[in-house]
Image (spheres, helix red, strand yellow):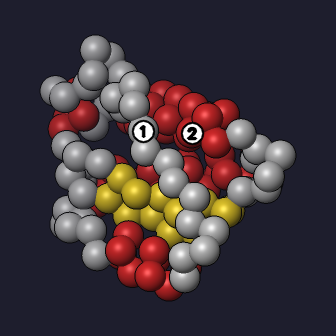
Amino acid sequence: MFTKAILDDLRAIFARVCINFEAGLVEFDGEDDHVHLLVNYPPKVSVSALVNSLKGVSSRMIRQKNYPSIRKKLWGGALWSPSYFAASCGGAPIGIIRQYIEQQQTPH
């Protein structure tokens, strides 16, 4: 359901939300049914608060744009499923994580 245009919109939305949390969107990409974000955030920020804001703001903004591919596949009116996966990568080289995200099968 995610097209390149939608993913481009999501990238901009996520970057703005990160700024509000004094965080930085280091890398972003996605496939037609999910996204990956690499975010550098300060220790005072709770991961759950950041993710809830990323998902909530992006859901509202993308639904307002009324993309046809989104309307058909909403999760009971929501853009995202209620779950998410978050992992710390404090010891992993950023280049390896960035490479993984860049290798997603991005829709054209």
Q: Position of residue 86 (x, y in %)?
A: 50, 48
Residue at label 2?
51
* Quadrant where the N terminus is found in the figure: top left
Residue at far top of view: 76
Residue at label 1?
84
**Is residue 28 something one can see in this rendering?**
yes
Residue at far front of view: 91
> Dot 1 surroundings within 10 Å: few (below 14), some, or many (20 or more)?
few
Q: Position of residue 38 (x, y in %)?
A: 53, 63
**In the image, residue 67 above or below residue 41:** above
Q: Position of residue 96 (x, y in %)?
A: 44, 82
- Pick the residue in front: 43 or 71: 43
**In the image, residue 5 above or below residue 105:** above
**Rendered residue at 55%/82% (across/down):** 93
Label 2 vs label 1: CA separation? 8 Å
> Dot 2 surroundings within 10 Å: few (below 14), some, or many (20 or more)?
some
Q: Nearer the observer, disc 2 or disc 1?
A: 1
* Quadrant where the C terminus is found in the figure: bottom left
Q: Amino acid at mark 2?
A: Val
| Left/right of residue 49 with respect to residue 57 in the rendered view | right
Label pair 2/1, CB-CB below 8 angstroms: yes
- Pick the residue in front: 77 or 64: 77
Q: Amino acid at mark 1?
A: Tyr
**Rendered residue at 27%/68% (across/down):** 104
**In the image, residue 14 above or below residue 105:** above
